[in-house]
Image: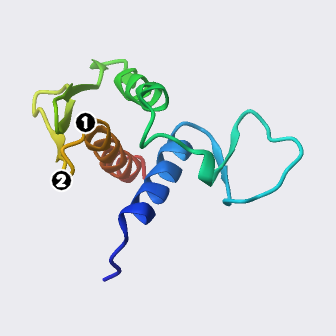
Amino acid sequence: MVIMTKEEKIIEGNAKIAEFMGIKVLPAGYISRNLENNEKQADDLKYHSSWNWLMQVVEKIENIKNESEGFLFCFGIGRDFCVIKHNTITQDHISVYSEHNSKILSVFACIVRFIDWYNSQQK
């Protein structure tokens, strides 16, 4: 079992979110004269610290829908927690309670867990 540092978890989470958002993640320190619109360097990702970045992901998740059930997911966000509910009869949900008493890190962690779950459902 590999134990990751907080910084490693943030880097990995940022990369997962970026890929979910359709962004190609380039290695930290990668030098390129012309980054494409859908490319970002790993050390430039700010999903863990910027509401402007993170809310785009919240909106993308809340806009996932299918023809029979409509919009599939909604968020509940509090001071130190985040819940993503599946809008179905079963009301499955993903919850994260932050160890850091941080709203943005709670939402960030919840989104990373959601992406892991969502990707596993797409296989």
Q: Residues within 10 Å of mark 1 (few under 14, many from 20)?
A: some
Residue drawn at (87%, 41%), measured in percent from left and top?
34
Q: Secondary structure at mark 1?
A: helix
Report if the CB atoms under discs 1 and 2 are less than 8 Å apart.
Answer: no
24 to the left or right of 60 = right
Alpha carbons under labels 1 and 2: distance apart = 10 Å
Residue drawn at (70%, 37%), measured in percent from left and top?
38
98 to the left or right of 23 = left
- The quarter holding residue 6 reads bottom left
Q: Which residue is mark 2?
A: 99
Between 101 and 24, which is closer to the camera in this rendering? 101
> Residue most toward the front?
101
112 to the left or right of 24 = left
Q: Residues within 10 Å of mark 2 (few under 14, many from 20)?
A: few
Query: Percent x, y for residue 7?
Result: 43, 62
> Residue most toward the right?
33
Residue drawn at (76%, 58%), measured in percent from left and top?
30
Query: Percent x, y for residue 106?
Result: 25, 42
Mark 2: which amino acid?
A: Glu
Mark 1: which amino acid?
A: Lys
Between 58 and 47, which is closer to the camera in this rendering? 47
In the picture shown, does residue 116 fall above or below 104?
below
Between 34 and 113, which is closer to the camera in this rendering? 34
Q: Secondary structure at mark 2?
A: loop
Q: Quadrant of the N terminus?
A: bottom left
Q: Colour scheme used in the picture? A: rainbow
Exactly how many numbered labels are in the figure? 2
Q: Which residue is mark 1?
A: 103
Query: Percent x, y for residue 67?
Result: 37, 18
Residue drawn at (20%, 25%), measured in percent from left and top?
87
In the picture shown, does residue 27 fall above or below 112?
below
